[in-house]
Structures are given as C-alpha cells and as structure tokens.
Image (spheres, rainbow, N blue to C red):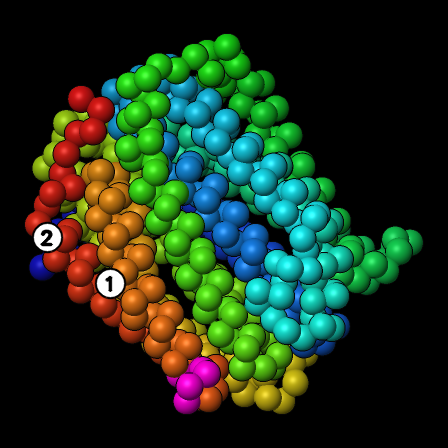
Amino acid sequence: MLIGEILQDRKYLRSLMMIALPLIIQQVITYSVNLLDTMMIGSFGDVTLSAVNLVNQFYLIFSMVIFGTISGGNVLNAQFWGRKDVKNIHRVMGIQFMFTFAVGVCFLAASQLFPREILRIYSKDEAVIESGIIYLRIISAVYLLFPTGQIYSGALRCTGNTRTPMLISGLTLCVNALLNYLLIFGKLGFPALGLVGAAIATVIARALEAFLYILITYLHKLPTAAVPKEMFRFNGPLVLMVLKNGAPVIINETIWGLGTNAYARAYAGISTASIAAYSAVNPVDNIAQALFIGVGDACAVLVGNLLGADELETAKRYARNTLFLSWCTAILTGFALFLLREPIIGLYNLSDAARDYAMKLLAIVAAILWMRTSNYTVIIGVLRPGGEAMFCLITEALVMWLIGVPLTRLLAFHFGLPVYWAYFGIVSEELIKLVIFFFRYKRGKWVVNLVD
C-alpha cells in the first residue's frame, strides 16, 4: 500500500518534516493570534467585528498581490538553490523589492485618500463604514512594512531555512497579541483604545518583523544576505524569467483575492449578522488549514529544489506522497472540527442569529476541508514549482468567476437564502477545481527544470 511505502521512505519524511514542521508551527501561531484578535474585537459586538473584517478584505487584495509576486519569484529561487546559485536568488529578491514597494505605495495612498469609497464596496451599513475608516487609515502603514518580511521569509524557505521565519513570526505575533490586549482593553496603565489599539498593535508588530528579518539575515550572514548593489544588478533574461513565472501567479492571486472579496460582499449584503458569522468562522478555518498550508509550501520547496537539480523522478515521488498525506490528514482534521464546532463558536460574543449562522457555516467548512487542502497542495506544492502557473491562473479564474461567485450571488440575492446556503458557491468552486487539477497533475507536464 502507498501509506506503507511512504512510511518506509525515511529520507522523504525527514526532508518534508524539516521544512514543513516550522512552517506549520508558524501558520498555527499566525492564525491562532488572528483568532485571538478576532475574539478581542468581537467582544465589542457585530458592528466592530464586521468593520475589521471588511478592512481585512481590502488588505487581502494587497496581500495576494504581494504573495503572488513573492511566490512567482520563489519558484525560481527554489530551483536556483537546487543549483546553489545564490547570486541569482539575490537578484530575484531585488526584483521583488522594487515591485512590492510600488504596490505598497499605491495601496497606502488609496487607503488614506478614499477609505469611505473603499469600504462602501463591501457594505452599506454606515456604522460599520465609520468604524472601518478609522481602522483602515491607521493600519495602512502596514502596506510598506509587510513585503520586507515576506521577501526574506520566502527566500529563506527556498534555501531550506524554515526555522528562522518560524521564530521571527512567532515572536512578532506574540508581541502583536500582547499589544492588542494592552491597547484594546487598556491594561497595565495603557489607554483603552478599542479598534484603534488593534490597528496600532498590528503596525508595531509588522515593523518589528521587518527589522528582525534584516537584522538576523545580515548578522548571521545567511544565504539571503545580499548587498543592495548585488541585489539590484539584474539582467534582462532574469527579469523576463521572473515575469514569465511571476506574472501569472500575481494575476492569479489578485483574481483570487478579488473573488474572496466578492464572496465577502455577498455575505455582508445579506445582513450584518451574516458577515459577523463569516468573520468568526474564517480564523477557525485558517487554523484548520494551517497544517496543510505548511505541508503544501514545504512540497513546493522540495519539488522545486529537485527539479532544479534534475532529479525528476524523485520530484514526482515526493509530490505523490505529499498529496496523499494531505488528503488523509485533512479528512481526520475536518471530522474533529465538526465535533468541536459548538465550543469554538461559544468563544465569541455573537448575536443569536450570527451564532446560528456560524455553527452551520463551520459544519460546511469542516466537510470540505479535504477538498480545499488537496487543491492547495497540488497548485502551490506541485504545479507552480513546475512552471504551470499560467494553467493554474486560467483555471482558478474561470471556475471562481464563472461558477463560484455567480452561484453565491444567485443564492444570496436572487433566492434570498441565508449565508450558509450562499457558501455553497465556494463548495462548488472547490469541487470543480479538485477534478481539473488532479487530472492536470496526473499528466505530468509540471515535471520540468525551469532554470537549466
């Protein structure tokens, strides 16, 4: 049996765990702190919780553009590291810095100049919009801080160093949680700032994160410690290579972020209780997926390194094993999440309607967890490292915008169904993608050395 073969492949398991375990811990810490933040903010009621969630939807678009830029470059960085080509890794980082800074400036300007217009895209509730404007204007400073940590973190992972990002992320997130507690509720002599305190805490934590990455990288002379002169000395062929692999990922993640925004707009359009329920369930969903995000990202590093080193058969075996492990573990995790949904939702201070919606939403999230994690692993961990970014872009965009989003809006607005019925737009999207991407994976076109 395949499971027996996987358990006997000690080299594979050791390689996977060395990279995946720190990533999993980092993801769990990240989403646990987000859950704690949501619970703190949620103690002020549905309006405040909804305002933060809507601002986060706009932030999601930014983070997806940044994630796409960094992921597209790291497809090459993983294969460059397979050839121990450090100079080109530094040059790819330079390209990432230039693009993400420009994007950050654009989002910062939009948040400062047009906050009301941005939030009205998502909700017509004036109470929610007024609270959101205050939060958005303060937290927009993150747009210039967030990319630095992500660039260094991504490059370090490509070189097999997942421990440093885990430690830095864990420290900064704990600082964020502590500052949230102090500034939101006014503990230990600090002023009780509520929503403003949550925004200030996030900005301070992101500034600390960027500082620590730069300090540790250059203090310990890690492989990503590039001098600026070398980082920004790149040539035409390299830029074209980054664009070829990065542009589809950037577009893909941006379209995905816009689609997620469209889902949130539909839920907010149903009622404030609906978006509050979604806001409560989303961090729990993220924690449940943390294990599989770590495994999928680790698979991308392993597969990318092996393809760059021309070990194609080993890359195929590692991809198959990781997909199987993700699928099996996701089924067990989803079952546990279903059983624990009542005490989890009980942690929030939700209205009766929002609580009822959240319970039903969480049951659906638990049931489709295996589909979502399988899709993540095959897209991020297998197809993109093999240069299949364009196929992923086209497929995800078409399925989301031709099936998932229209079905959600149809259920929410035309039929006037509750939010948990509208969520079946996402269910249909994930199911269709699962079938398409599985057959694409089986064709094996992703087994290719991109940097030869």
Total numbered circles: 2
Give, as a three-letter code, the residue at label 1. Answer: Lys
Observer-nearest of 325 and 423? 423
Q: Residue at x 14, y 34 (%)?
A: 448
User: Is disc 2 surrounded by few (<14), some (14 to 19) or many (20+) residues within 10 Å?
Assistant: few
The stretch in magenta equals 411-415
Quadrant assignment, res 142: top right
The residue that mark 1 highlights is: 433
Q: Is residue 186 magenta?
A: no
Does label 1 or label 2 sit earlier along the sequence? 1
Q: Residue at x 17, y 38 (%)?
A: 315
| 1 or 2: mark nearer the eye | 1
Q: Is residue 70 above or below residue 438?
A: above
Q: Residue at x 49, y 18 (%)?
A: 225
The residue that mark 2 highlights is: 442
Q: Is residue 67 above or below residue 337?
A: above
Q: Residue furthest top?
A: 229
Observer-nearest of 418 and 151? 418
Q: Are marks 1 and 2 in contact (CB under 8 Å)?
A: no
In the picture, the quarter occupied by the N terminus is bottom left
Q: Return the x and y of residue 52 as percentages of the image width and height.
A: 65, 63
Q: Return the x and y of residue 251 as percentages of the image width and height.
A: 37, 46
Is residue 286 visible in the rendered structure shown here? yes
Is residue 15 visible in the rendered structure shown here? no
Q: Is residue 414 magenta?
A: yes
In the image, taking residue 132 as reference, residue 339 lies left or right, namely: left
